[in-house]
């Protein structure tokens, strides 16, 4: 048994699916299945209950999951303490997809210039998956949007970001100098899928003002949302950081008059894990960074 096997087992346990775990770990499904089988042979009991499209932990599997998390946490913390000098090391950062391509490039350039010996490994995922991975110690810090419901994690708001109304260039609202929420009631919305917290922010803002947006399209990529808006499928609310990277001439953006929709960007981490000097420095740079 080695730490690689334990990490692979924890990925399967978290995702409940060997195929998805293999994709995340960047190994073949047969190789992952053999790794789990060897682990089961060593413990002498099945750790997973195989079903048609998923796997579930057996009682033995739940025990191994708990102990594996503890063992890996101790090993990772030990390595971090030994190598910790505040300048070099490896940090695993999880980021939701509606932040990663817009916020990270500028931040990574500045951080890389200041700390050339540090390695930041970036992993994009949905909020729920990032919280689970942060809790288990698979990532050191997560960048996401509030609110979140997570036990055993600390969160800190970094900044607020306005959500802008996106529409085709020939849309009737594009001619208005002032746009309020009531103006968009007649129009369908293009939104991200329900797994994305940005959709929760959009729907939450509208519901607080007694308005339920009607979604005619749902997708998993923010760039697809923008293209569907250009094609006239509906309007949408887009984060300001994404708008700043959008150079298309087929759509326009407007800030709402009065109360503006926004989202709160935050970092989350596990306070029960050892915090290296490098992670502390990263958090300070995130607090200070302005895109």
Image (cartoon, grey):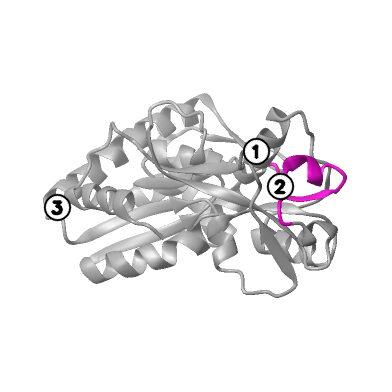
Marks 1/2: CA–CA distance: 10 Å
Residue at image position (37%, 57%) is 290
Residue at image position (59%, 62%) is 243
* Image coords of residue 214 (percent x, y): 83, 42
Which marked residue is nearer to the observer: mark 3 or mark 2?
A: 2
Which marked residue is nearer to the observer: mark 1 or mark 2?
A: 1
In the picture, residue 242 is in which quadrant? bottom right
* Image coords of residue 7 (percent x, y): 41, 47
Q: Point out the tag, 1 or 2, that comes first from the N-terminus.
A: 2
Residue extending furthest toward the right = 186
Marks 1/3: CA–CA distance: 39 Å
In the picture, residue 28 is in which quadrant? bottom right
Viewer-nearest residue: 204 or 272: 204
Give the residues drawn in magenta, as a range. 177-194
Q: What residue sits right under mark 2 in the picture?
A: 193
For mark 3, give the secondary structure.
Answer: loop
Q: What residue sits right under mark 3 in the picture?
A: 84
Let me know if residue 38 appears in the view: no
Q: What residue sits right under mark 1 in the picture?
A: 200
Q: Is residue 205 left or right of residue 110?
A: right
């Amino acid at each position: 048994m080695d730490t690689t096997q334990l990490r692979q087992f924890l990925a399967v346990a978290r995702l409940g699916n060997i195929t998805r775990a293999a994709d995340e770990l960047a190994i073949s499904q047969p190789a992952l299945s053999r790794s789990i089988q060897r682990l089961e042979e060593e413990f002498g009991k099945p750790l997973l209950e195989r079903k048609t499209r998923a796997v579930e932990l057996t009682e033995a599997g739940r025990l191994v999951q708990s102990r594996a998390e503890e063992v890996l946490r101790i090993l990772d913390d030990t390595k971090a303490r030994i190598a910790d000098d505040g300048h070099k090391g490896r940090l695993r950062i999880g980021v939701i997809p509606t932040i990663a391509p817009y916020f990270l490039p500028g931040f990574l350039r500045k951080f890389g210039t200041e700390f050339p010996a540090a390695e930041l490994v970036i992993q994009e995922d949905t909020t729920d998956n990032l919280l689970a991975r942060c809790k288990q110690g698979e990532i050191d810090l997560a960048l996401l949007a509030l609110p979140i419901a997570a036990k055993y994690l600390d969160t800190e708001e970094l900044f607020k970001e306005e959500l802008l109304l996106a529409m085709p260039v020939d849309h009737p609202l594009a001619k208005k100098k002032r746009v309020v929420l009531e103006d968009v009631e007649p129009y369908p919305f293009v939104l991200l899928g329900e797994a994305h917290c940005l959709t929760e922010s959009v729907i939450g803002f509208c519901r607080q003002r007694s308005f339920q947006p009607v979604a005619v399209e749902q997708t998993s990529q923010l760039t697809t949302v923008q293209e569907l808006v250009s094609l006239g499928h509906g309007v949408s609310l887009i984060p300001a950081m994404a708008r700043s990277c959008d150079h298309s001439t087929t759509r326009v953006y407007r800030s709402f008059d009065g109360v503006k929709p926004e989202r709160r960007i935050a970092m989350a981490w596990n306070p029960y894990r050892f915090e290296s000097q490098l992670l502390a420095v990263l958090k300070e740079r995130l607090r200070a960074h302005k895109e």
